[in-house]
Image: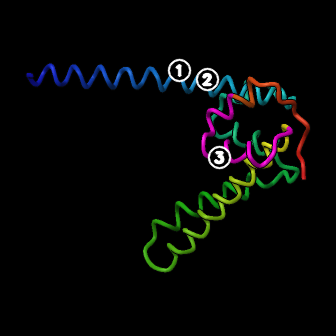
Amino acid sequence: MTDSSIAATLLALLGTYLVILLIWYILQVIAFWKIFTKAGQPGWKSIIPIYNQYIEFRIAWKIPYMYWVWLACMAAGVILSSINGWVAYIGAIASLAATIIGVLATVKLSKAYGHGIGFAIGMIFLGPIFMMILGFGSSQYLGPQD
């Protein structure tokens, strides 16, 4: 096998991977579009990367500022973890707090559509598949639950 045939094979594999990734991303945007529409939000908001998470938090959570708390924890985690010394531990704690808030938001999103903790666990571990089930399935938006 020559170098050019190896390169052509790798490019073909990369191209195939990128096409599959693009199709998967489009399916996710469509699923979020449906999820947002079920919640009374315009579907176009699912296309904008950071804004769609904000809308997802608003759909799932009664507390309107929790997105900003999550975002601040994420930013603090990234920034402080890059600093050497004891400050990095504070960054790790901030990242852990962001992860916990994200998991709680996922549970609340599941409950907002009338599902329980089992569906929320599925959303955490197999998120894209369960988002498509939530978007394309018969789930109805009930509003933020306690």
Residue type highlighted by circle 2:
Leu
Label whose residue precedes the other's in the sequence (3 or 1): 1
Write down the residue under mark 1: 23
In x, y percent, where is residue 10? 25, 25
Does the CB distance between marks 1 and 2 fall below 8 Å? yes
Q: Main secondary structure of the magenta part?
A: helix
**Marks 3, 2: nearer the viewer:** 3
Front one among 107 and 7: 107
Separation of disc 1 and disc 2 at Cα?
A: 6 Å
Q: Is residue 40 left or right of residue 91?
A: right
Residue type highlighted by circle 3:
Ile
Write down the residue under mark 3: 124
Residue 127 falls in which quadrant of the image? top right
In x, y percent, where is residue 11? 27, 23
Write down the residue under mark 2: 27
Separation of disc 3 and disc 1 at Cα?
A: 21 Å
Tell me which segment is drawn in magenta: 114-132
- Residue shown at the point (67%, 22%) measured from the top left: 30
**Marks 3, 1: nearer the viewer:** 3
Residue type highlighted by circle 1:
Ile
In the image, residue 85 lies in the stretch drawn in magenta = no
Label whose residue precedes the other's in the sequence (3 or 2): 2
Front one among 3 and 129: 129
Mark 2 neighbour class, 10 Å CA radius: few under 14, some 14 to 19, many 20 or more: some
- Residue shown at the point (68%, 33%) measured from the top left: 131
